[in-house]
Every structure is written in structure tokens, then in C-alpha cells.
Image: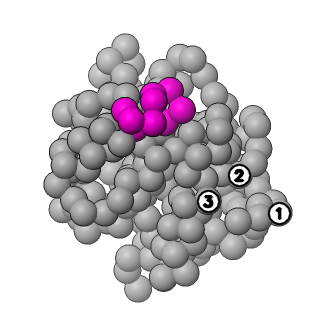
Amino acid sequence: MKVNSVELEKRCRDPKEFPRFRLPEIAFAGRSNVGKSSLINTLLTRKRLVAVSSTPGKTRAIDFFRVNDTFRFVDLPGYGYAKVPKTVQDAWKKLIDAYLVDRETLVSVVWILDIRRELSELDRMLYDWLCSYSIPYIAVCTKADKVSLGERAKRKEALRKALDQDADLVLFSAKTGLGKDVLWKRMRAAISHGEGRKS
């Protein structure tokens, strides 16, 4: 996928601020410090479009990026960072819930998991939530370069079984580019399939 243009269209802290112009949207969700920012930057071939921080829980708004003037990437706040005050966590949850449930132009969620970590309770909650609302998703295992080839296969299979699904998880590395083309292929299919879950 050639990215000719990309811009931060809007940063929203309230559902009322969400862009109204209709474009297909791919959202990115995952727990804090899972490598979400690096993944988005790698896909868009931009080094610093999305700020990469060593401090988990930095993203506190939903960022809408317009790509090639034909679709959007939507960066959702990371979940599960304990040091964030509960009032902030509750505000994030309401914001994310409002987006995922009501966004008509959402075509798929890229659900990001760290291949080195077990599924957390919040990971399972998000998985159940996506399934219950019939929201299409693509499961991606980041930081694949940080484990051996043999361990990659074992971890991938363990996560697949934990999710009780047949769909193949995408192994991804922002460092090596592993999985970039595969992920783009799946996202393009989601975009071309339709402009949203609702008419």
C-alpha cells in the first residue's frame, strides 16, 4: 500500500467532536505499551506521526488520521494502565465505547497484542465485547522480533487457542517490517468490503 498523504484530521476527547464526513475507518486498539504507535507509524511509513512514548497511558484522546483522502486510521487510547487515575480511565472507557458502538463508518478494529504477554482480563473483555457487537477485527501480535522463530510459533498458537478462533493472527514487527504487507492486505479488504457496519 502506497501512502501518498496522511494528516492528523482531528483529536477528540468527546464523541460530539468526532468527524462527520463519511470515510471508511480502521481503528487501532490495545493495552497500554503494546506497540500501537510504532505499528501505526510503520504502516504509514512515518517516523513520528504518532508519538511513541516510554510512558504507558499517554494517549488520552481519539486521534483521527486521514489517509490518501480515502479512509481514516483511528488511534484509540490504550487500556489497562493502572497508574492512570480511575476518573481518567472511566472517561477513556466512555469515549472508546461511544466510538466502537455508534461509529457507522468503522469497518474493522486492529486489535493489538504483545506476543510476549499472556492475554489480560481487559484483553479478554475487549475480545468478548467486539464479538458481542459483531465488530470485525484483525488480531495482530506485535514485537515479534523480540522472540525466537520457534517461540513465535508457540506464542501465536497459544494466543489463537486462547481466543478460540480459527482466524490466523498477524505477526508484526515495527523494527523489521514483518507482517506489514499482510496487515495492509487485510485492512484493504475490510475497506473495500463496505463503508461501515450500518447503512
In depth, the one of 168 and 163 nearer the eye is: 168
- Quickly name the residue at label 1: 4
Q: Position of residue 180 (x, y in %)?
A: 60, 53
Q: Amino acid at mark 2?
A: Leu
Q: Amino acid at mark 1?
A: Asn
Dominant SS of magenta comes to: helix
Up/down of 198 relative to 96, above or below:
below
**Of 174 and 105, which appears nearest the observer?**
174
Asked if residue 24 is positioned above or below residue 77 in the image, the reply reads below
Residue 17 can be seen in this image: no
Q: Does any portion of residue 70 appear in the rendered image? A: yes
Q: Residues within 10 Å of mark 1 (few under 14, many from 20)?
A: few
- The CA span between labels 3 and 2 is 12 Å
- Mark found first going from the N terminus, 1 or 2: 1
Q: Is residue 98 left or right of residue 165?
A: right
Q: Quadrant of residue 31?
A: top left
Question: Secondary structure under badge 2?
Answer: loop
Mark 3, secondary structure of its residue: helix
Query: Can you tell which of label 3 and label 2 is closer to the viewer?
Result: 3
**Which residue appears farthest toward the bottom when viewing the image?**
199
Task: Give the mark, 1 or 3, whose residue is nearer the N terminus.
Answer: 1
Residue plotted at (57% across, 17% down): 54
- How far apart marks 1 and 2 lie (CA) works out to 9 Å
Q: Is residue 150 magenta?
A: yes
Residue tagged by mark 2?
A: 44
Nearer mark to the viewer, of 1 and 3: 3
Residues in magenta, as a range = 144-152
Kindly identify the residue that appears in the image at 50 percent across and 27 percent down: 146
Question: Which residue was labeled with disc 3?
Answer: 181
Number of marks drawn? 3
Disc 1 element: loop
